[in-house]
Structures are given as structure tokens and as C-alpha cells.
């Protein structure tokens, strides 16, 4: 399948193209669990709106990277959303990469919308050479930056943060933030991405 640029996918003047894309492309959302946070409730609203119509692939599959599914799992399943849990942990990165790639291929996903901040850069690195559009969505950067940079003795934590940020900037087709202030907090590196 041809790789679509984010400018065509999200461009305001491409209504006809957007309609075709919405009807035929499948989006996988990546988050850690299905709790009662902002991402999860937004996805649940989108899934409830999309169930049974031509937009059902906008929440085609949800990939959970945490160790728990969360309380909203049954609600998503009622709307026909496939949920796959693949724990993303330091000791099982290669297994994560294999399982993540398998889900993307088996489900015929065209767009991966990752809601996990800089960790999406590590997901992109582990899924190198997949023909998908990669969208990183930043939600709580100040908290994440402070948390990961507060303990300089944890070299593995710092390494994950810097590698994740680097590959997020290099491999994302688009980086969005909620709210816009988030990109200012991250600095110049994120704003270089289209």
C-alpha cells in the first residue's frame, strides 16, 4: 500500500481524499492501559461514534503496552474494538518488537497513533521498515520530562528517554500535542518535525 504523507491525511483542503482514507485505512492506537484518563475516554467516545459506520477503522485496534488492561476494556469490546496487550518492558524488547510487528501486519494497520510520549520513538525503532504512517501524540510532557530526568543515577532511564526522543523526532510522520504548549516545553527538537 502506498505511504500517505501526514499533510494529505490531515490537510484541511483534502476532504475527498480524507473520506477515502477514513473508509479504507485502519488506525491502531497505542497506550499503556484503558483507565479513566483523557486518552482513553477520547478513544472510547470515538469508538462509540464509529461503531457500525464507515469510520469504524479509526479505532481499529488498541495496543496496550502496560501490564494491566484497565477497567474500560469491556466498554471498548462492546463497540467491536480489538484490544491486544503487549507489555513493553526492558527485559523483553525483542519479544515486544516481534509481537507488535505481527499485530500491525495481521490487522493490516495503515496508521499507528501512539499516545505514549517519547516512548513512541522506541516503538518506532523496534518497528523499523514497516510501511505505516507513524503519529506521535504528546499529552503530559512536563511531568514525563521531570520524572525521567530527576534521577541522574538511573542511566538506563536517561538512555531510554534520550533515545526515545531522538527516534520519535526522526521517525514520526507527525507529532501532535494536547495542548499546544506541550511542544514549547519539549523544545526545538520536537518542533523540527513536520
Image (cartoon, rainbow, N blue to C red):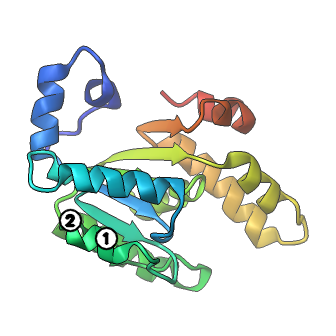
Residue reaching furthest to the top: 13
Depth order, front residue of 111/48:
48
Q: Which residue is mark 1?
A: 75
Q: Residues within 10 Å of mark 2 (few under 14, many from 20)?
A: some
Picture residue at 73% right of the left edge, 63% below the top:
159
Q: In the figure, residue 104 lies in which quadrant?
A: bottom left
What secondary structure is found at the residue carrying circle 2? loop
Picture residue at 50% right of the left edge, 69% below the top:
35
Q: Contact, CB < 8 Å: mark 2 with mark 1?
A: yes
Q: From the viewer's perspective, is residue 71 above or below residue 133?
A: below
Q: From the viewer's perspective, is residue 180 above or below residue 11?
A: below
Depth order, front residue of 103/143:
143
Determine whether, in the image, residue 123 is placed left or right of residue 145. Answer: left
**Marks 2 and 1, how far apart at CA:** 7 Å
Q: From the viewer's perspective, is residue 66 above or below residue 151?
A: below
Picture residue at 25% right of the left edge, 73% below the top:
77
Determine whether, in the image, residue 101 is placed left or right of residue 140. Answer: left
Q: In the figure, residue 173 lies in which quadrant?
A: top left
Mark drawn on residue 52: none
Depth order, front residue of 36/26:
36
Mark drawn on residue 79: 2
Determine whether, in the image, residue 186 is placed left or right of residue 164. Answer: right
* Residue 12 x, y percent position in the rendering: 29, 18
* Residue 176 x, y percent position in the rendering: 50, 36
The answer to whether any part of residue 27 appears in the image is no
Number of numbered discs = 2
Q: From the viewer's perspective, is residue 8 above or below residue 135?
A: above
Picture residue at 9% right of the left edge, 33% below the top:
20
Determine whether, in the image, residue 155 is placed left or right of residue 71. Answer: right
* Residue 153 x, y percent position in the rendering: 90, 71
Amino acid at each position: 500500500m502506498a505511504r500517505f504523507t501526514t499533510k494529505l491525511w490531515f490537510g484541511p483542503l483534502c476532504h475527498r481524499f480524507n473520506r477515502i482514507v477514513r473508509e479504507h485505512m485502519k488506525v491502531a492506537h497505542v497506550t499503556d492501559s484503558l483507565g479513566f484518563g483523557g486518552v482513553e475516554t477520547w478513544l472510547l467516545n470515538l469508538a462509540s461514534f464509529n461503531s457500525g459506520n464507515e469510520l469504524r477503522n479509526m479505532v481499529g485496534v488498541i495496543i496496550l503496552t502496560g501490564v494491566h488492561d484497565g477497567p474500560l476494556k469491556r466498554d471498548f469490546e462492546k463497540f467491536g474494538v480489538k484490544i491486544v496487550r503487549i507489555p513493553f518492558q526492558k527485559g523483553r524488547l525483542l519479544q515486544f518488537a516481534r509481537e507488535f510487528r505481527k499485530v500491525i501486519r495481521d490487522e493490516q494497520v495503515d496508521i499507528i497513533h501512539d499516545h505514549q510520549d517519547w516512548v513512541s520513538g522506541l516503538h518506532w525503532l523496534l518497528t523499523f521498515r514497516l510501511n505505516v504512517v507513524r503519529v506521535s501524540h504528546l499529552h503530559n510532557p512536563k511531568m514525563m520530562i521531570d520524572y525521567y530526568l530527576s534521577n541522574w543515577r538511573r542511566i538506563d532511564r536517561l538512555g531510554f528517554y534520550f533515545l526515545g526522543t531522538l527516534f520519535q523526532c526522526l521517525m514520526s510522520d507527525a507529532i501532535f500535542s494536547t495542548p499546544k504548549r506541550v511542544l514549547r516545553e519539549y523544545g526545538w527538537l520536537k518542533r523540527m518535525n513536520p
